[in-house]
Image (spheres, rainbow, N blue to C red):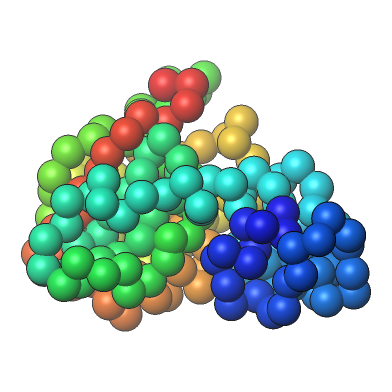
Amino acid sequence: MEQMLAAMGGFGTVKVDGQQSDADCAAIKKFQERFGLRPVDGNPGPATHDVAKRLRASDPAQCNAGSALTACIDLTHQTTWLMKDGKVIHGPTVTRTGFDHPDGMGAPTPSGSFKIIERQRSNWTESFKVYLHYWQRIMDNNGFHETTTYIHDMSNGSHGCVNLLHSDAVAYWETIKVGTPVKIFGRRPGT
C-alpha cells in the first residue's frame, strides 16, 4: 500500500519501509476519504488496497484519446478519467459500471466510442424511481451520474450507467459538454 500511495502522490508523506507510521495512516485516511471508502480509519484493508491497485493499473494510453477533451472508461479496472491534449486532467478515479442484474433490468456497459448526447442536472428515472444527479447521457439509457449507493460494493452495479462519486460527478459535470467524446474499453469482471 505504501508503494502505491507514494507512486500516486497527493495524499501526504508516505515512507516506503513496510512499517505503518502515523504519517502513513494519515495518507491512507486521505485516500479513503477521496475515494469514498468505508470506514475511513487509516487501515489499509482489502477494499482500500483493491482501489489503489485498480487506480495504479489504469493506463491512459488505452483510451486512445487524441487531443480533444475525452472521457475514458476502463471497464476492466472500473476506473475513469478525463483527458485533453494527451494528458489526464482529472483522475483516474473509481467508477461502477453495468452488468446483468437479477431484476432483468441491467446490462453490461458496452465498449466503444460515443459522445455525450444530453445533460441534465437532475434526471428523474421512472424505471428506478430515483433522481440521477449530474446526468450526462452517453447512449440509450446509459450515462454518467452520481451514484445513489455505495460504489465499492461490486456485487451491486449499475444498469449500464457509469456511476461516479459525488466529487467526480461534479467535476465531470463542470468539464464535459454535449458532444464530448467518450471512449469505453475493456470488460467488467464477471460480465
Q: Is residue 20 visible?
A: yes
Which residue: 25% across, 60% down?
71
Judge from the rendering whether residue 28 lies leftward or rightward of residue 116; answer left or right: right
- Residue 57 at what x, y percent from top left? 47, 46
Which residue: 90% across, 74% down?
22
Q: Is residue 129 visible?
A: no
**Quadrant in which the N terminus appears:** bottom right
Examine the rendered structure and indicate whether residue 128 appears above or below residue 182.
Answer: above
Q: Residue 185 falls in which quadrant of the image? A: top left
- Residue 100 at what x, y percent from top left? 43, 23
Number of callouts: 0
**Quadrant in which the C terminus appears:** top left
Judge from the rendering whether residue 87 lies leftward or rightward of residue 95; answer left or right: left
Examine the rendered structure and indicate whether residue 13 appears above or below residue 35.
Answer: below
Q: Residue 90 falls in which quadrant of the image? A: bottom left
Q: Nearer the viewer, residue 19 or 23?
A: 19
Which residue: 72% across, 78% down?
13
- Residue 43 at what x, y percent from top left? 85, 57
Judge from the rendering whether residue 37 lies leftward or rightward of residue 121; answer left or right: right
Examine the rendered structure and indicate whether residue 54 appears above or below residue 24.
Answer: above
Q: Residue 135 falls in which quadrant of the image? A: bottom left
Which residue: 39% across, 75% down?
171
